[in-house]
Structures are given as C-alpha cells and as structure tokens.
Amino acid sequence: MAGETVKSVGDDWTWFTEYVYLYSTWTLNCPPDRRCQVGMGVMAFGEPRGEKIRFSGSQKIVTVGIGSIHVRVDDGKGPCNVRLDQGDVGLIPIL
C-alpha cells in the first residue's frame, strides 16, 4: 500500500493525486454524517470528466489508465477532512 493522503475539502474540487496504472484500487473516507463526491479521470473545464460518485463514510473506487482523483463536499455544510488510501495497483509494463 502506497499510503494515505488527508486533505480539507470544501465545495470546490480538491486535487488528491494523479494516477498512471493499468488499474488501481482506492478507499475514500468522508465523515459518515457528511456527503462527499469523488471525480476521476481528466480534469477539464473546472471538473473531472470521468466517473463521479457521491458517498458518505467509506467508498471504494477503481481507476483505470491515466487521470486524477478530485474530491469535494456535496452537502453544503462547509469543509471537512477526507482521507484517500491507495490499495492494489496493476503496473503498466515497459518493454
């Protein structure tokens, strides 16, 4: 496991990490009494252009290829701390 990242997240998309893997698993942890949204993929025109998921508590996600992970609070209650933990990865072979 590569580690964890904790950031204070508000209403705007907050960058967490870039990724370049065949696949990678991640766990996001938002307070259980809050609603957050994670966006994956390429960031363009002010928002992630890949999949977006709303969640409370813990949310497991899988990313594929190249992109970034951004998170924002989606409940209008102000900022909160969110933690991102990286799990398994599939490396891209270099010949």
Image (cartoon, rainbow, N blue to C red):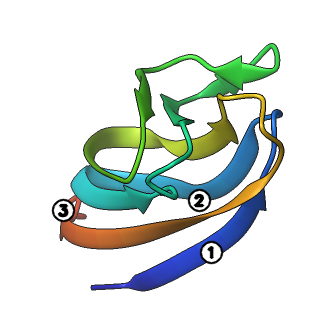
Q: Earlier in the sequence, mark 3 or mark 2?
A: 2
Which-is-in-front pick, marks 3 and 2?
Answer: 2
**Circle 1: element type:** strand
Q: Residue at x 32, y 60 (%)?
A: 27
Q: Callout 3, which amino acid?
A: Pro
N-terminal of the two: label 1 or label 3? Answer: 1
Q: Which mark is residue 17?
A: 2
Quarter occupied by residue 77: top right
Residue drawn 27% across the image and 85% down it: 1
Disc marking residue 82: none
Choose top left, top right, bottom left or bottom right for residue 2: bottom left
Give the image location of residue 72, x and y in percent. Answer: 68, 39
Relative to 34, residue 18 above or below? below
Q: CA distance from mark 2 to mark 1?
A: 11 Å
Q: Which amino acid type corresponds to the residue marked 2 in the rendered image?
A: Thr
In the image, taking residue 4 as reference, residue 59 lies left or right, namely left
Above or below, 6 relative to 68: below
Cα distance in 3D space between marks 3 and 2: 21 Å
Q: Nearer the viewer, residue 80 or 67?
A: 80
Q: Disc 1 to disc 3, how far (Cα)?
A: 30 Å
| Disc on res. 6 | 1
